[in-house]
Amino acid sequence: MNLKSILCSLSAAMLLLVSCDSDTASLGGSLTPSEDSVAVRAGLSYAPTRSIDYHDSLLARTSVCYLGRFTDPATNTVVQAGYLTQVNCIEDFLLPDSVYGLDKFHFPEWVDRKTKGEAPFSANLSIYYKQLFGDSTNVLNLEVYALDKAIDVEKKYYADVDPVEFYDETAKPLANVMICPTDFSESDSIRQLKNYYKRISVNLPESFAREILEKYYSENGKEYFKDVTSFMKNVCKGFYIRCTRGDGTIIYAERTDLDLHFKYLEKSASGKADSLLSVVTNFSGNSEVMQFSHFENTGLAALKAESNCTYLRTPYGLLTEATLPIDKMTEDGSTLNSASISFTRINNDSQHPYMFTTPKYILMLRKSEAVKFFEGASKADNKTSYAASYSSTYNQYTFNNIARLIEISLDERTEWLEKKGLKDDAAGHAAYAAAFPDWDKVILVPATSVKDANNSVIGYSLDLGMKSTRLVGGPDGESITIKTIHSSF
């Protein structure tokens, strides 16, 4: 709220008092002595900003996995993405009494004649997605590895997680295939359906399918498949899928299923096993199990070094850090009623058909609390965390009132100084800044909102889409203006 608005509000209040009868008017005057009148003033402060790397402490787990490679035509930086995923096994999973093709089961001779030349069983990974970034007709080379170390479901993994922790990078991959994101065998009418999921299928070796089936029919097989924990421990720990060649496409994978194809004999009503059925069962990788993407960004150092602007760039690219002039805003002892801050976007004039898009939402978080915020999938509380949406009208992100953040920061410092027996003076402030160097710093983080069934925002998660924008600021650029309203008696 600006000074003009406040003065108008005070004027309206005075007019209301004047309109009362003489008795109530004199009563109002007696309650507000002239020496207690409120002085209101507007002020300006300035916050320096800089680009920083994403914190390694930001969580890596996500409901969408990313796969592919893209070179940004505007900056010549490269994003390469792959992901790790577990696959789920429903509780008390069951297969038929016997499966054709395993040595321990004997089937009638007519089954052999009927299936002559066919593989008895097989396995494949099905990658389902609705969206991608870039060219849907590009060819990508994918490699699939089986994990040899289980992902710990009780552990929190962060942006710096290395897939090499979970698989042997010197081993031969389970699959090495060339794929095109668009399945041209599907008709246009099918691909344009609202609920249509595009699918990429990657064939796995027959030996992999055999190993899974043999484990089920082993002595402890039912125990191995009784729930997802036992399945991941004893049968399949998961997969790492990465892109090794190709450029211009990032796939947003929402689900990765392990499909197991096999044949078995079904009994008729008479009890005779005379029908050979071909079936598929799947183990689904989705947000119910652990999955997280691994990104390799190259070329970001040059962007980070630019001194006349700052960057917001995902996935796991660059953030903007602002240092709030907290002491400057409160040095005269007046009450800080409001403080608003805006970050202006620098337009990108490139006409390339595939450009990183502007983040729709960003969060302003205390730098020291970013870990806690995302670990709790928190909702912005307008105290120490704030959300803003991009305004195309003003070409800005605006946080309307961060006064509560300033107040909390000062209160925490005062409390610490008292506990340490230090004075609230320059020396005490220096000691506090040495102990808590991020006490006056906030970071801007691109985010996506998490909504409930009623479309109400219940939290925020990291935005890992292909997003990028430059902001006015930087060490040698224009400082960011903070507009304040103060009051004093």
Image (cartoon, rainbow, N blue to C red):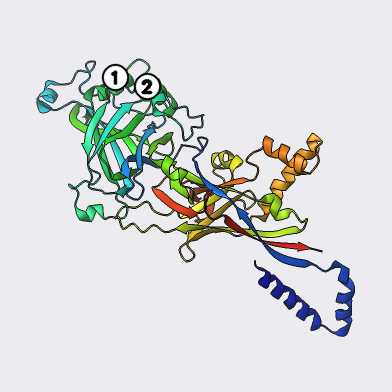
Residue 26 horizontal/vertical position (percent): 89, 79
Disc 2: which residue: 148
On the image, the x and y values in percent for residue 129 come to 32, 45
SS at mark 1 in the image: helix
- Tell me which label, 2 or 1, sits earlier in the chain: 2
Q: Residue, x 19% and y 18% (percent of image)?
A: 106
Q: Is residue 453 visible?
A: no
3D distance between C-alphas at marks 2 and 1: 18 Å
The correct choice, above or below, for 26 with respect to 268 in the image is: below
Residue at 48% across, 54% down: 471
Q: Residue at x 20, y 32 (%)?
A: 277
Q: Position of residue 399 (x, y in %)?
A: 58, 57
For the residue pair 200 and 405, the one nearer the viewer reads as 405
Q: Which mark is residue 160?
A: none
Task: Tell whether 213 sits left or right of 229.
Answer: left
SS at mark 2 in the image: loop
Amino acid bearing label 2:
Asp
Which quadrant of the rendered structure holds the C terminus? bottom right
Residue type marked 1: Glu
Q: On the rendered structure, is 280 left or right of 467? A: left
In what quadrant of the picture does the N terminus appear?
Answer: bottom right
Q: Which residue is mark 1?
A: 214
Residue 77 rendering spot, x and y as whole percentages: 36, 43
Task: Write down the quadrant of residue 23 in the picture.
Answer: bottom right
Binning the other alpha carbons within 10 Å of mark 2 as few (below 14), some (14 to 19) or many (20 upward) gives some
